[in-house]
Amino acid sequence: MNVKTIIYSDSNTLTPEKLQENIEFNKKSNDKIIYYYINGDSEYLIHGKYADEILNNIYGLIIRKIDNYNYYNNYIINLMDSLNLKKIKDLQCGWNGNTYLVEYINRQLVFKLEKMDVYDKSLPLTSEYFRQIDFDKQIAKKYPNKFMTLIKYDIIDNCDFIHPKTEEVLEKADIKRKERFIRKNSQPNCYYLLYTHF
């Protein structure tokens, strides 16, 4: 990248007028300036011609040290063993999380695993994890014939899970989706949800 200047600012200083000024100045500088707006949750709002390349390089630092596919498979096998689960088959690997059909105490259940994103700890329902648990308690348990219900759930500290679709997301997602994906998958913890299976 032929970038001459990188400017870091607190996200609290960002206004619509300032963003527009940055965009215009970036164009006049022939895309030689990159602006980072950083907040306390390590979220980056990046503007500039090289934004995609920067995001890919940042996430590359996380996954470059391992064989992503093999590492992912080994991690899932070991994790399921520790939870007394037997994997039957993969169900879906989305950009947020992965689901599997598993056997647990002679029952077929759905196992979901994903990284735990940052959230406001004073407002638990800002977390995807806690929202899903709350939905189970408030809605699903009351209508088990219409919704899958939770059997078990927990947070896994210092989780080594690496998302198997990293390359696909970085190639296909728009800049905001990439920012969210990188932030979420850079966090130290995971969570799992074990659901009934229709």
Image: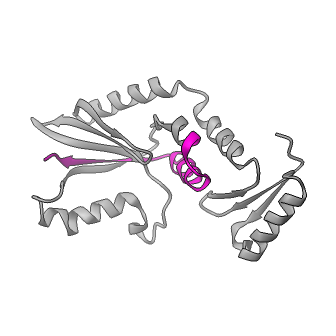
Instruction: Give the side of residue 158 with respect to residue 22, left or right.
Output: left
Image: 16 above or below 55: below
**Which quarter of the figure has residue 44?**
bottom right
Q: Residue at x 44, y 52 (%)?
A: 116
Quarter of the image with the N terminus is top right
Taking the image as shown, residue 143 lies to the left or right of residue 74, namely left
- Which range is magenta? 170-198
**Residue 37, percent across and down?**
71, 62
The colour scheme is one colour
The quarter of the displayed image where residue 105 is located = top left
Q: Is residue 45 above or below residue 86?
A: below
155 or 55, nearer to the observer:
55
Percent x, y for residue 112? Answer: 31, 45
Residue 15 visible (yes or no): no
Tell which of 81 and 86 is nearer to you: 86
Residue sitting at 81 percent across and 65 percent down? 22
Point out residue 187 in the picture as x, y percentages from the top left corner.
Answer: 52, 48
Between 79 and 24, the residue placed more toward the observer is: 24
Residue at 21 percent of width and 35 percent of height: 102
Q: Is residue 47 rendered magenta in the image? A: no
Residue 187 lies in magenta, yes or no? yes
189 shown above or below 145: above
Count up the numbered dots: 0
Q: Is residue 77 visible?
A: yes
The residue drawn where x is 60% and y is 37% is 62
Quadrant of residue 106 within the rendered picture = top left
Left or right, 23 with reference to 75: right
Percent coordinates x, y for residue 111 in the rendering: 26, 42
Residue 54 vs 133, above or below: the answer is: above
